Image (cartoon, rainbow, N blue to C red):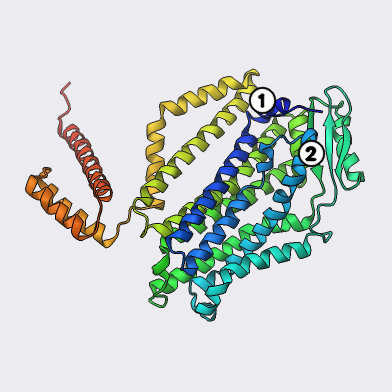
Amino acid sequence: MRTVREYYVDAFNAESLFGFRMIISASSLLILLYCLGLSALVWRANSKGYENKFMSVLLVCEGIKASFIIAQLTPYIRRYEWLQDILWHWTIDVFFMAHITAVIMYLCIPIYYRLNRLSFMNKQAIKKHAWYIAPALGITIWFLIRTLPFFYVSDATWIVCEEGKDAELDIWFGEEQDWMNEEIDKFNEEGGCAANFEATITTQPPGLWLIALGSPLVSLLALLFIRSSIKSYNEGDNPDFSKSLTSRSLYIGFLGKVILLLFWLGLLIFISAVNGDQVTFVDETLWRYGNPDFTERMLYFLWIFSLTITPAAIAFEAMMFVHATLKDTVFGIDNNLRKTFSTAVFTGIGVISFIIGSELMESVIGYGAAGGVFVGVSLLAVRKPILIIIDKASTRFIPSTHTEEETAYLEAYATAMEDRIITDEERKLLTTVATAYGLNEKIVNQLEEEYNARLQEEDAQKTVDVGLSEEEDTPEPLN
């Protein structure tokens, strides 16, 4: 049996894309914790608001959906099969309960955010109970269908390989099936095992794939619901929409998630088309531990990369949900979310670029790490321009917004800063304004820093414009 050390060494070697899958697993766990924390924050922001309760429960479901491969963080080997027996309930039962619950809650959007054509659903009596009935219904549905053949994972086995020997089966649960032996034959036909490993293959019921692949379509329906509600609000037919959520942030969150999930579907279709058949986790094992050519290595990378999309989509959606819900109650949430977004995107670009560079260099000179190091150093060299681009994109997603009191203080501060100097008398006046509007010192300092930073940007831009103007006015030398 493999040891824990062998498992983690294997997970971070070049053939395993330098731990790419393990990084995704760790990120999925962080996104789960992130969503749980945001859920608690949304709930506490207005614990009596039914919209907040609804959004809080939905964030928990989305976090669980993002955590589908966290079991890979643990020693996923036969020696710790008892641990996988426990985690299996999270991977299947909890995961698909969350999926079904999320689908039901998407369909409940017209209850909490009025749509003209479905205005009969927007009733206070329904709002009061729908937020907890939906998860109760999702859990009930899963327990009713989980043992049906269309949804039931009935059999699983370990593929046990020792380098130079034929692969063998070691049943995990269920019974040995003909398709398991067919998969083993694929290894043995290529000359046996090319490495030491233990991996699992299971039955893959079409019902589970239907639930997972149907999620983008239901998300698209939810997007249409939100768009319709925004349209009603803009036409003056939905005055309550803006009380609890900022329509733009909510819409962007759903839109970003739908685009990423549709991209995920397209990527799976592309990988299956190149592979010549539907791709499953069995193919991943073959591409990792068989004798893959360059095309199969690229398919392996794309398959692992596809696992990043759902967690990334959910993390983006959660971030925008929180901005929509808390922007009027938590000062500075805009800046904090933008910093989180920028850091996450830059880190993701770095990891993916390192792996792609390594794979390309491996195919050229046979030493992949050189390509990864070169790409990593290059990214660090151009870090600032990349971060500026990401910051500009994040500003479009999450624009700075202020309450009426904060806006009033900014106007007073802007007037005092016309000569770029704050006198003692002006400072006393600003302090009086801040006190009158109930703004504490922390908020005042952040507002002033924000305004000063904007002034510096304007000054820098003016300097650049003047320099360009002088260059244009300079006459060309006579020959």
Residue 127 point in image, percent of width and height: 53, 74
Q: Which mark is residue 13?
A: 1
Q: Quadrant of residue 142?
A: bottom right
> Which of 468 and 42 lies nearest the eye of the viewer?
42
Q: Vertically, is 286 above or below 392?
A: above
Q: Vertically, is 379 above or below 265?
A: above
Residue type pointed to by label 1: Asn
Give me the C-alpha separation between circle 2 and circle 1: 23 Å
Residue type pointed to by label 2: Glu
Query: What kind of element bears circle 2?
Result: helix
Total residue callouts: 2
Q: Residue at x 75, y 27 (%)?
A: 3
State the quadrant of the N terminus: top right
Residue 456 point in image, percent of width and height: 22, 40
Whether residue 276 can be seen here: no
Q: Are marks 2 and 1 in contact (CB under 8 Å)?
A: no
Q: Residue at x 48, y 60 (%)?
A: 43
Instruction: From the image, tell me which residue sits under label 2.
Output: 81
Whether residue 164 can be seen here: yes
Query: What kind of element bears circle 1?
Result: loop
Residue 356 point in image, percent of width and height: 59, 31
> Which of 30 and 185 lies nearest the eye of the viewer?
30
Residue 420 point in image, percent of width and height: 12, 43
> Which of 120 and 61 lies nearest the eye of the viewer?
61
| Between discs 2 and 1, the one toward the N terminus | 1
- Left of 420 or right of it: where is 87? right
Q: Which mark is residue 244?
A: none
- Left of 279 or right of it: where is 49? left
